[in-house]
Amino acid sequence: MISGRLPLPQSRAYQLILGDCLQILHELEKASCDVVFADPPYFLSNGGTTCKSGRRANVGKGKWDESQGIESDHGFHRDWLSGCRSVLKPDGTIWVTATQHTLFSIGYVMQELGFKILNLITWEKPNPPPNLSCRYFTHSTEMLIWAATNEKSKHRFNYIDMKAENGGKQMKTVWKFPAPSKVEKLHGSHPTQKPVAFVRRCLLASSIAGDVVLDPFAGSGTTGVACVTTGRRFIGIEKAPEYRQLSRERIEAVIGPGRSKGDALT
């Protein structure tokens, strides 16, 4: 049990907790995190196919990505989002990735729980796989919901920084980022891995150095890498030991000399 612990002691750059976020989130200190970045399952591993290297390939990622039906999937989103809301500070914000398969369920749950939705970001991919069935438009985007803890939140938005990053113009809600590069997969990869630059922008927009960032689905540790390279403190929750280890290796690889390292809780 880790109940009652500070989420991330000042002396550490990160913590990686091995376990199910549905349990761990309710054991963390209440109102202790400035930002949550969450990349939950899209529930697409139910026999679908995609295109890889010009050939049809199964999109199965594992049991964790298999849909259990609309009601069950919706309940899952309610459970983990409820846990995230409990650990967010009153003026904190949360970023949640989604596709058309999960967007509407997640958005509805967030409104039910009292989150204030701030923006719906569209991540445009420059080189998406083609649609082999030729019966739909090619899927070339993923969505990103940005929300504050509640309607009264005085959320942080580093407007000047985002404007500067966009060449002096207001940044719009369509972001173009390529898929993770080979360099980002040197230590291994995760089937739903996001590019570091994508997560980094979210953190630079909504937090400052020293803030605590939580990722309830740590995966390959991309959020952790973005945190330690921008001076944020990171808490990652991951239930697969192999991905928790991958996260640790990636984070340790980018922590500079003299930085306090983290630990991996079990």
Image (cartoon, rainbow, N blue to C red):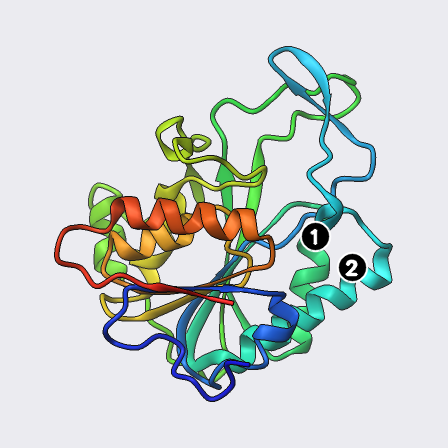
- 148 in relation to 59, above or below: below
Q: Which residue is mark 1?
A: 102
Q: Is residue 7 left or right of residue 22?
A: left
Residue 201 shows in the view: no
Residue of label 2:
73
Q: Please name the residue shown 60% across and 21% down the image.
A: 129
Q: Residue at x 28, y 56 (%)?
A: 228
Q: Are marks 1 and 2 in contact (CB under 8 Å)?
A: yes
Q: Which amino acid, mark 1?
A: Thr
Q: Position of residue 144 (x, y in %)?
A: 53, 52
Q: Is residue 221 rendered to the left or right of residue 80?
A: left
Neighbours of disc 1 within 10 Å: few (<14), some (14-19), many (20+):
many
Q: Nearer the viewer, residue 19 or 90?
A: 19
Q: Which mark is residue 63?
A: none
Q: Of 145 and 229, which appears nearest the observer?
A: 229
- Report the amino acid beneath label 2: Asp
Q: Tell me which corner region of the image, top left, top right, bottom left or bottom right, holds residue 114.
A: bottom right
**Is 198 on the left or on the right of 105, as rendered?**
left
Find the distance from the CA under tag 1 to the CA under tag 2. Answer: 9 Å
Q: Is residue 146 left or right of residue 181?
A: right
Q: Position of residue 240 (x, y in %)?
A: 60, 53
Q: Secondary structure at mark 2?
A: helix
